[in-house]
Amino acid sequence: MAKSVNKVILLGNVGKDPEIRATPNGTIVASFSLATTDRTKDQSGNWTDKTEWHNLVAFQRTAEIIRDYVKKGSKLYVEGKLQTRSWDDKNTGEKKYRTEIVINDLSLLSGRGEGEGGSYSRSSGAGAFNQSTPGPDDLSQAAEISDDDIPF
């Protein structure tokens, strides 16, 4: 069988406060939308922004972190996979579809001044939730640090 890949990487802002619910067996689920913006020049040479909205869903511990630390406007880095689910509408009997990004890895990038408590990262594979002090630049958290960079 040929190799296939289903991976999504997003960096954007949360559109509204996440919706938190629990399944009948007690699994916590967080659902929310994330906006990403692409800036391009039009034919007149003016910059135009095109915003794309993405539906995201997270389960278990990642959903708990979202519940506790994510709110409207939070800047997030997300890795996940695309998943489409379907159901029959109870009123019309019509088949409905929804494509979502199931979160595997989440980094909260909003700083303290933006209503967050720091920069947090949660990877479903690592099984850890780490807190670090935010730097002046959100992307500086992703840079590699060598022994020469440490002041002591």
Image: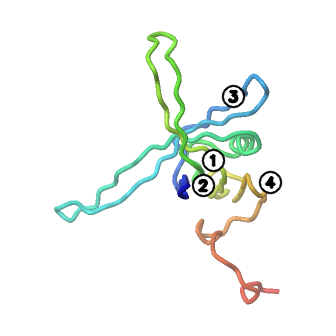
Q: Nearer the viewer, residue 149 or 56?
A: 56
Q: Position of residue 128 (x, y in %)?
A: 80, 56
**In the picture shown, does residue 146 fall above or below 63?**
below
Q: Quadrant of the C terminus?
A: bottom right
Nearest to N terminus: mark 2 or mark 1: 2
The label shown at residue 21 is 3
Inter-mark Cα distance, 4 to 1: 14 Å
Nearest to N terminus: mark 2 or mark 4: 2
As helix, strand or loop, the secondary structure at mark 1 comes to: strand
As helix, strand or loop, the secondary structure at mark 4 comes to: loop
Q: Residue furthest left?
A: 44
The label shown at residue 79 is 2
Inter-mark Cα distance, 2 to 1: 6 Å
- Residue at the disc numbered 4: 127
Task: Classify mark 4: residues with Cα within 10 Å, few (<14), some (14-19) or many (20+).
Answer: few
User: Callout 1, which amino acid?
Assistant: Ile
Task: Classify mark 2: residues with Cα within 10 Å, few (<14), some (14-19) or many (20+).
Answer: some
Inter-mark Cα distance, 4 to 3: 22 Å
As helix, strand or loop, the secondary structure at mark 3 comes to: strand
**In the picture shown, does residue 45 fall above or below 69?**
below
Q: Quadrant of the N terminus?
A: bottom right
User: Callout 4, which amino acid?
Assistant: Gly
- Residue at the disc numbered 1: 103
Which corner quadrant of the image does residue 120 belong to? bottom right
Number of marks in picture = 4
